[in-house]
């Protein structure tokens, strides 16, 4: 969003991030400082009375886009946690179209400006670079005191929700799919079992190993969702702003990718007439594990101290 706001689009559109966290002001400040948001407008809702009168959702579930007259042009753009970074390409194209409708033309473009992402890979690279810059800022910034009040929506202070910066000099090789403790013995045990399944898939690359991984992930996700539900995680959140529903959606995204890989592997095995294989692509285990690890950092960390 900062890249959009800092580009020529920033002269024709406002880019606004609104925090609805339990500790909204602290989180909004943390995001602004950590990610170096200078052109993007950052706000927060103190309570329900500040929520918008129209339907909205968490950013990972889709953005709300208004036209030049202040009318909602897109109520919910494609969700990042359903289609990945290509979701932002859709927003990019939509905002550009609306800006052109408001009078922007090619003469407004800066020579050599990479405003519109040509490929999803280009966008993903920019997201990666942004995260690296944010980690560097966290490394050099003074730590904020943790909020004293504990809220049932999230027990983890805002400054602890970003992935910890690892010291490359002393960094040990991490297991595929290995994630930090979430402070719940059952969930930690299941996460470790998933890491074992990822390593088996990477080693064997068989249809059976992938099928077993999907079965294990499905069981773990269902168990996790049941625990969050019974513990009141996200209870009372407005429609579209529920952290529980967002969590479930990200589970579905991981399983969708795994199921697509399984269908491909079965098709390859069928064409080979049941040969020895392997039929699972070499990149499969890592691609699913990457999603699993990001999910643990960005979603599972939020229920630490809440699950019963």
Image (tube, rainbow, N blue to C red):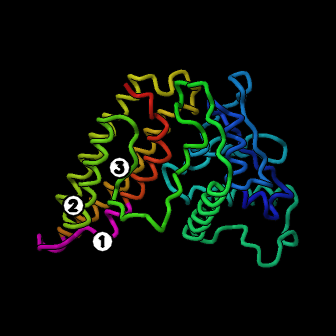
Left or right: 147, with 276 as reference point = right
Secondary structure under tag 2 reads: helix
Front residue (pair 232, 95): 232
Of labels 3 and 2, the one closer to you: 2
Which residue is at the far bottom?
112
In the rendered structure, which disc, 2 or 1, sits on the residue that comes first in sequence? Answer: 2
Secondary structure under tag 3 reads: helix
Residue 176 quadrant:
bottom left
Q: Could you give the CA–CA distance between mark 3 and mark 2, rounded to whole angstroms?
A: 18 Å
Q: Is residue 283 a member of the stretch shown in magenta?
A: yes
> Circle 3 sits on which residue?
255
Of labels 3 and 1, the one closer to you: 1
Q: Could you give the CA–CA distance between mark 3 and mark 1, rounded to whole angstroms?
A: 18 Å
Residue displayed at 45% across by 45% down: 250
Q: Position of residue 269 (x, y in %)?
A: 18, 68
Of labels 2 and 1, the one closer to you: 2
> Circle 1 sits on which residue?
282
Main SS category, magenta section: loop
In the image, the segment drawn in magenta is 271-287
- Indicate the quadrant containing the C terminus: top left, top right, bottom left or bottom right: top left
Residue displayed at 85% across by 67% down: 105
In the rendered structure, which disc, 3 or 1, sits on the residue that comes first in sequence? Answer: 3
Secondary structure under tag 1 reads: loop
> Circle 2 sits on which residue?
200
In the rendered structure, which disc, 3 or 2, sits on the residue that comes first in sequence? Answer: 2
Front residue (pair 279, 185): 185
Q: Position of residue 103 (x, y in %)?
A: 88, 59
Left or right: 242, with 186 as reference point = right
Total numbered labels:
3
Front residue (pair 94, 144): 144
Reply above or below: 26 against 79. above
């Amino acid at each position: 969003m900062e890249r959009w706001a800092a580009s020529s689009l920033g002269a024709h559109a406002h880019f606004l991030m609104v925090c609805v966290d339990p500790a909204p002001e602290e989180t909004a400040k943390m995001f602004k400082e950590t990610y170096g948001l200078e052109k993007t407008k950052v706000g927060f809702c103190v309570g329900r009375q500040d929520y918008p009168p129209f339907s909205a959702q968490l950013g990972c579930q889709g953005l709300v886009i208004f036209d030049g007259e202040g009318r909602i042009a897109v109520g919910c753009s494609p969700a990042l946690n359903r289609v990945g970074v290509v979701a932002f390409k859709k927003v990019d194209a939509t905002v550009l179209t609306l800006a052109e409708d408001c009078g922007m033309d090619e003469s407004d473009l800066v020579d050599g400006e990479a405003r519109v992402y040509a490929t999803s890979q280009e966008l993903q690279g920019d997201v990666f670079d942004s995260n690296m810059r944010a980690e560097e800022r966290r490394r050099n910034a003074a730590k904020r005191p943790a909020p004293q009040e504990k809220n049932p929506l999230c027990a983890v202070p805002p400054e602890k929700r970003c992935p910890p910066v690892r010291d490359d000099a002393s960094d040990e090789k991490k297991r595929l799919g290995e994630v930090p403790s979430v402070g719940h013995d059952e969930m930690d045990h299941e996460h470790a079992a998933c890491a074992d399944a990822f390593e088996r898939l990477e080693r064997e690359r068989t249809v059976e190993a992938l099928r077993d991984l999907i079965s294990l992930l499905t069981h773990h996700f269902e168990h996790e969702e049941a625990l969050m539900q019974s513990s009141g995680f996200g209870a009372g959140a407005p429609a579209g702003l529920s952290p529980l529903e967002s969590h479930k959606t990200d589970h579905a995204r991981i399983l969708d990718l795994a199921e697509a890989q399984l269908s491909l592997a079965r098709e390859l095995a069928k064409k080979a007439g049941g040969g020895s294989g392997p039929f699972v692509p070499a990149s499969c285990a890592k691609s699913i594990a990457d999603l699993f690890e990001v999910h643990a950092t960005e979603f599972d960390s939020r229920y630490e101290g809440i699950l019963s």
